[in-house]
Amino acid sequence: MAGDTVTIGAIVRRGADPSEVARGDLRVRMHLDQLQEVAGYGDRVDRFAIATTPTANIPKLIDRVNGIAFGFKAYRSRDIAVETSRTFQVVSRFHRAIGIITIVASSVFLLCIMVLKVEERRRDIAALRLMGISRATVMRSIVIEAALVAVLGSALGVALGWAASLLVNWHYQALYRTPLAFSIVTPPTVAFAVSLSLVLGIAAGVIASLRLVRTPPLALFGR
Amino acid sequence: MRAALAQASLIRHRARTVLAVLGVAVAAAMLLDMVMLATGMRESFRELLLSRGFEIRLAPKGTLPFDTDATIPGVSAITSTLRRNPDIREISPVLGASIHVLAGNRDVSGSALGIDPRVQGDYELLSGRDVTTPDAIVVNDHLLRQLGASVGDTLNVATGYDPQTRSYSGQRKLVVTGRVRFIYGASDQSSAAMRRETLEGMNGQSRDRASLFMVRVRNGANAEQVRDWIDKQLPNVTAISIATAIAQVDERLSYFRQLALILGAVSLFVGFLLVTTLVTVSVNERAGEIAVMRAIGVSRSHVVEQIVLEGVAISFAGAVLGLALGLVTARYLNTILSAFPGLPMAIDFFLFQPRAAWSALGLLIVSGIGAGIYPAWRAASLPIAESLRREAIA
């Protein structure tokens, strides 16, 4: 009956559905027969969801349904998901591009800091060279030091990133009222960040130490 | 003198200066992009809405224009009511519907607008002529390409597809009289326009309905006041002014603004940190030199100015390079975001505005000055005798 009175049975929260993000739609859930009655729909539905057996031949089944169906069409859930997730694919590509720019920025920053750090030790290195320590040993020690600094820095960065990720999720989950995870720190992400930092640190160490060990020790002292 | 000393100090360590400038440049590029993203999207949307001079839009109550299939009944009555307001100059009712163009075995679907060609504000005519007769239709390039048709061809156009019976409620032969560009249309959207009465007749709907009204107000009139007046006079419609439309878009796209704010702040901080580190290391290395300068009578303020100048010089060089880099990356990022499904072609997420460039440059210069303050303070407060003694021992 149209205009029927209903009792609120429960309060539900949104599912982790990206398509609902940033939409302020008000939603209620009812039993199908009750909604059909209230809306005056009769024995109609908007769509059917069909679960198949694990071994089912889905394309054949869809062809068969479409061959005999009258008034509706069958689609594979995966195809619908691809079509409806185009927005998120665009956002994902945008995030990737921003990520690349950020990596370039942090690479230059890291390289610069490492070069500065090594150059600060000009006098120590000059002293080591005057004491008879070989160029190779000096270089190795600088590279090891650079690698250690890079690993320590990236460990701190991972902790900061993890905290930032928690903050981002907390903020956007509250803003959009969704349990969707906006930022996830995964082992491959951590491995990538640490590896990149290590490679850059070692590269910076090699570049800076090469410049220093090629300079005569007395010149490093400013003589 | 100060500038010459600052320049000499930067040139002395070319490699590190170049690296620092590069670092600041990338941070500046990111900052400019984020300033453009934060302000450009809104400005671009505002320009789009104002492009044809219609400041107010009326949609069915509780909806946004073309957000649903709902329509507003009583176009004539609503138009008469609106005409009573002397501040309203022009009214353009628009009816929207899905169409199917039947070409042999093919069924090409698209969207159609029913308009009044004298007051329409939805498209620009690129070639041919407008829909001056009831059997005329104008289409965009995307639909023409899909159909392989051209101006002068006759199309079999149908509306009101019923999936239950796989039939159409209305079908009519229409002649393509013109090629148009839909101002609010997406690049991958097949669209057409015809006279509103033609679409109404095909749609099988009762006459005198519209999906949207676009209202142009008199020059100098307050659009917000007119909107309030419409709200009171017409309770079955939602009147949306440019300001309310922008507020709604802001709400939906707040994610991008917040992202821009966070990344912009991080970029600025990274640039600041880089310049501070570089100048601090440079000051530490030159402690003896600075002590000598102070010992021969060079004032503290002179030393401070020289150090701050070094920071500003690195920031400025990086900023100039970064602004150019930022424009290139902004174009690339805009290309990515313009692929949003259904986004009007004319919307730019990254819109270059001189104000944005000046803001980014200003922020970087201020950050450069800030970055030089700590090392400058350290340099100015060096104990002269002790520094000279340490330098002599070293």
Image (cartoon, helix red, strand yellow):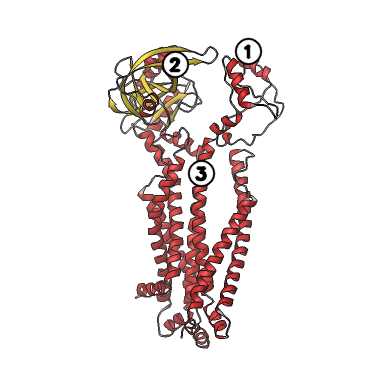
The answer to whether B320 appears left or right of A220 in the picture is left
Pick whichever, B260 or A82, lies toward us: A82
Report if the CB atoms under discs 1 and 3 are less than 8 Å apart.
Answer: no
Q: Residue furthest right?
A: A9
Q: Which mark is residue B362?
A: none
The answer to whether A143 appears left or right of B168 in the picture is right
For residue B114, which quarter of the picture? top left
Task: Tell me the residue that label 2 is attached to.
Answer: B159
The subunit carrying tag 1 is A
Pick whichever, B340 or A171, lies toward us: B340
Task: Tell me the residue that label 1 is attached to.
Answer: A42
For residue B365, which quarter of the picture? bottom left
Percent coordinates x, y for residue A114 in the rendering:
53, 68
Residue B297 vertical placement versus B340 (above, below): below
User: Amino acid under label 1?
Assistant: Gly
Q: Nearer the viewer, mark 2 or mark 1?
A: 2
Disc 2/disc 1 C-alpha distance (Å): 25 Å
Percent coordinates x, y for residue B57 in the rendering:
41, 27
User: Amino acid under label 3?
Assistant: Arg
**Element class at badge 3:** helix
**Element class at badge 1:** loop
The subunit carrying tag 2 is B
Percent coordinates x, y for residue A137 in the rendering:
59, 77
User: Amino acid under label 2?
Assistant: Thr
Name the residue at 63% across, 60% down: A155
Task: Tell me the residue that label 3 is attached to.
Answer: A93
Q: Are marks 2 and 1 on the same chain?
A: no
Residue A113 vertical placement versus B345 (above, below): below
Q: Earlier in the sequence, mark 1 or mark 3?
A: 1
Disc 1/disc 3 C-alpha distance (Å): 44 Å
